[in-house]
Image (cartoon, grey):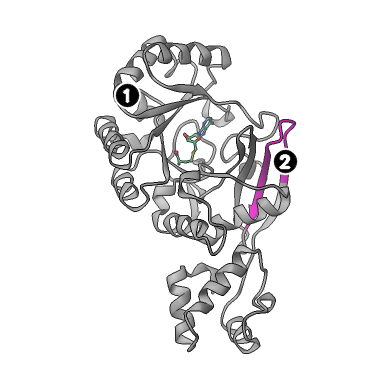
């Protein structure tokens, strides 16, 4: 077993079982966050302990298999883990800082019609350390600081809640990286019970919800998960989340030609979100050939945005970064498997 597969609590327990003092866990955690590749490198641990650990546990690291760099500074990484499975991570540079989009699963079971990650379903959940590893490798390879992390890569974070939660705690711990919870955003397709739990567990972490439709019927066609977690329940839960956490909820809305981009859709969307402390991110759809769906295009996106703004809904059209590389979720892995 890999030592890093254990949660930090389990690591402490494993060390206690070896008659070690509790502070050893923190020492090892610091080494992990510093990018150590073996127990042997952990020079402030007694040699006997390093040997004992190496006898009992493996200590794997991820590897950058491929890096595509776009003219706009976006870098997309394909990262492999010790079992050979791969995930995608995207580094983006904005005026206000650098942002990293990490994956939480290899593949995804949510089956959204427009998304490349869902093709082929979920292969496996990523462990907390494998999510952290994406951050470590990307800082190493870009040589740049990362100010914001979004859990918006491959996978549904709330379908891997325990490891996602362990990751959030690890990256936040000042003993290692110490990233503020306010600089992290988790994006979900809308698993209601987990949204509620997340609000209780991580009230400072930003929540983004993939909405993509303003009525139940359209949403079901685009997102099978909508059959279980219906819009008329989801929106009030988001409203309550915004109220109890005091934080604005983001809604993602990919504009798909002739599916969800009419003036009527904009009006319905505005009515749906009225009074909710939120922001809408309009995303020009990244074309995924298999889906047969087409992007509305930037012009239509700007018209849709104006309509929403006129109706009092805060919204922006997301800048399309990395358009010249395999930018859509799951595309890089799919094209290199
Ligand atoms: N499962 C989570 C997070 C991963 S997807 C979620 O659903 O939110 C991250 C975002 O990218 C989601 O809003 C998703 O709907 C969107 N997305 C997926 N495929 C896309 C595509 N081809 N074009 C534009 N956005 C896409």
- Frontmost of labels 2 and 1 is 1
Residue hosting label 1: 273
x then y, percent, for residue 240: 26, 37
> Can residue 179 be spotted in the picture?
yes
C-alpha distance separating marks 2 and 1:
37 Å
Above or below: residue 254 compared with residue 97: above
Is residue 104 rendered to the left or right of residue 165?
right
| Quadrant occupied by the N terminus | bottom right
Residue hosting label 2: 68
x then y, percent, for residue 100: 59, 44
Mark positioned earlier in the residue sequence (2 or 1): 2
Highlighted magenta segment, given as a residue range: 67-80
Is residue 326 rendered to the left or right of residue 116?
right
Q: Nearer the viewer, residue 172 or 301?
A: 172
> Can residue 2 be spotted in the picture?
no
Tell me if residue 73 is in the magenta stretch: yes
**Quadrant of res 72:** top right
**Quadrant of res 287:** top right
x then y, percent, for residue 253: 45, 26
Is residue 231 rendered to the left or right of residue 56?
left
């Amino acid at each position: 077993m890999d030592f890093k597969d254990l949660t930090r609590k389990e690591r402490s327990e494993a060390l206690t079982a070896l008659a070690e003092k509790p502070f050893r866990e923190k020492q090892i955690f610091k080494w992990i966050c510093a990018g150590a590749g073996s127990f042997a490198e952990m020079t402030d641990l007694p040699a006997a302990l390093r040997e004992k650990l190496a006898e009992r546990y493996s200590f794997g690291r991820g590897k950058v298999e491929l890096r595509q760099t776009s003219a706009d500074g976006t870098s997309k990484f394909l990262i492999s883990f010790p079992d050979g499975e791969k995930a995608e991570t995207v580094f983006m540079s904005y005026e206000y800082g650098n942002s990293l989009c990490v994956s939480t699963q290899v593949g995804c079971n949510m089956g959204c019609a427009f998304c490349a990650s869902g093709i082929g379903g979920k292969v496996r959940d990523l462990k907390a350390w494998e999510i952290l590893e994406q951050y470590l490798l990307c800082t190493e390879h870009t040589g740049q600081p990362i100010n914001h992390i979004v859990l918006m890569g491959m996978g549904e974070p709330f379908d891997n809640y325990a490891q996602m939660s362990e990751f959030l705690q690890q990256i936040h711990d000042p003993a290692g990286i110490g990233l503020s919870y306010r600089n992290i955003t988790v994006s979900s397709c809308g698993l209601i019970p987990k949204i509620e739990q997340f609000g209780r567990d991580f009230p400072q972490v930003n929540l983004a919800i993939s909405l993509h439709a303003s009525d139940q019927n359209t949403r079901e066609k685009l997102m099978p998960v909508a059959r279980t977690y219906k819009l008329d329940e989801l929106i009030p839960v988001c409203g309550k989340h915004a109220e109890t956490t005091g934080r604005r909820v983001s809604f993602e809305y990919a504009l798909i030609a002739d599916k969800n981009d009419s003036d009527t859709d904009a009006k319905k969307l505005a009515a749906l979100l009225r009074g909710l402390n939120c922001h809408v991110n309009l995303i020009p759809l990244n074309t995924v050939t298999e889906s047969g769906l087409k992007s509305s295009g930037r012009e239509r996106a700007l018209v849709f945005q104006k309509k929403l703004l006129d109706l009092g809904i805060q919204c922006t059209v997301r800048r399309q970064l990395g358009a010249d590389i395999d930018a859509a979720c799951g595309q890089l892995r799919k094209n290199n498997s």
